[in-house]
Amino acid sequence: MSSAASPLLPVFARADLAFERGEGCWLTATDGRRYLDFAAGVAVNSLGHAHPHLVKALTEQAAKLWHVSNLYRIPEGERLAERLVEASFADVAFFCNSGAEALEASIKLARKHFHANGQPERYRLITFEGAFHGRTLATIAAGGQAKYLEGFGPRVEGFDQVPFGDLEAVKAAIGPETAGVLVEPVQGEGGVRPVPPATLRALREICDAHGLLLVFDEVQCGVGRTGTLFAYEQAGVAPDVMALAKGLGGGFPIGACLATRAAADGMTAGVHGSTFGGNPLAMAVGNAVLDVVTEPGFLDHVRRMGLLIRQRLAGIVDAHPRLVTEVRGEGLLIGLRCAVPNTEVAAAFRAEGLLTVGAGDNVVRLLPPLVATEADVAAAMDMIDRGLARLEQDMGLSAARGAAE
Ligand SMILES: *Cc1c(COP(=O)(O)O)cnc(C)c1O
């Protein structure tokens, strides 16, 4: 726990829990207790902990070369870019070190596109309520959440927020300064809210009709998390620009901005950059993550485990209606909407040995490593069932049920 004397800046409300090692979906705490990790470092540990293929790629690369800077060619990065481009709508990739940086690159790329095409006045992006795009000055402005903006001075200009999924509001917000639309195909931090596929398709049509760029933030929902390599595939439409991060490095900090060559036509030598982005060590790990996620059958497994969890959770919601009310999400990005504070529910799960993550809209997120097995899922569902039963008892809700019936 961060005490008053802690030398860490106290910007995180940390659980009083530290880990020593991990294997697959399991973590061992410093006190020896084992936890089933359905938080996965907030959707980052896509292949769980200490995955042999990632350990091998990292250690082999570490013995050869870590960093050279982008003053030189980086073959590992060229290979990762080629593979991401091959597997997506994109023609080019830019590597950085986090989700927020991937969004910064995407926002700058969209603005520069119009600048390069004789419409420098088009710099504004339409965004959605409940969005989360990161913690830099531009990305808190894009996310538009008061709690993240307050106290940090004038917000960065250029973002117009409309209600979640409201197509009429999008059309009404388009003006002579609009450059595009920025949206998470599945809102993560906002509470695991998937944008309906028809809405994503309509956004594509609106952007095409007005000559705007469509930018997807797949920092959380990308790289297999929803059961397809990219979440947008399920809607049958592609963006012009996409930000990736979290799962792409499997725990190594990697961000990426992917774009079509047409959208990226303003991004020439010198206009953007990163000292660390795309270094050989990061790129070796990114390639190793892709090796596994693109193996035949891997995404089928993600979809199967996702369905299994949702089936089990549906029964659990029926059994504990005073605590949890709804299951939502795609693949292994799953939200459990709570009827009591989500912090209490997450704490009850943790007491049973299961790690989860809170989200907006009073949701608890289940973000298991994509390699979670049927046995891991069964163990997690038992912990959830027990945790909710215990919480019901502690909150006197089982007595209330007895009285009401
Ligand atoms: C986590 C997240 C970000 C920010 O990523 P950082 O690596 O924390 O900067 C941006 N967008 C979405 C959708 C995210 O989930």
Image: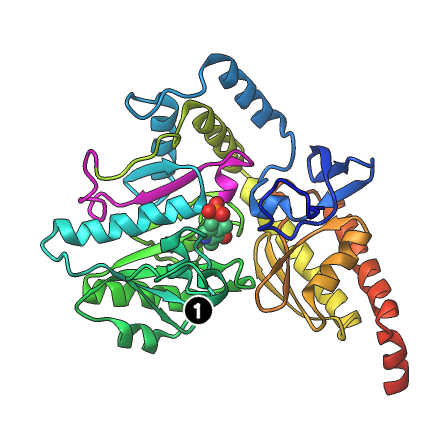
Front in this rendered view, residue 208 or 299: 208
Front in this rendered view, residue 55 or 146: 146
* Dot 1 alpha-carbon crowd within 10 angstroms: few under 14, some 14 to 19, many 20 or more: some
* Tag 1: amino acid: Glu
Front in this rendered view, residue 368 or 394: 394
Which quarter of the picture shows residue 273?
A: top left
Residue 114 locus on image (x, y percent): 17, 54
**Per the image, is 291 magenta?**
no
**Per the image, is 251 magenta?**
yes
Which quarter of the picture shows residue 159?
A: bottom left
Magenta segment, principal secondary structure?
loop
What residue would you read off at disc 1?
Answer: 129
Residue range highlighted in magenta: 246-270
Residue 57 locus on image (x, y percent): 53, 22
**Is 269 left, or right, of 31 in this rendering?**
left
Point out the image quarter for the C terminus.
Answer: bottom right
Q: Residue furthest left?
A: 118
Residue beneath the point at 26% across and 68% down: 206
Residue 101 locus on image (x, y percent): 39, 44
Residue 83 to residue 144: above or below: above
Residue 149 to residue 103: above or below: below
Which quarter of the picture shows residue 385?
A: bottom right
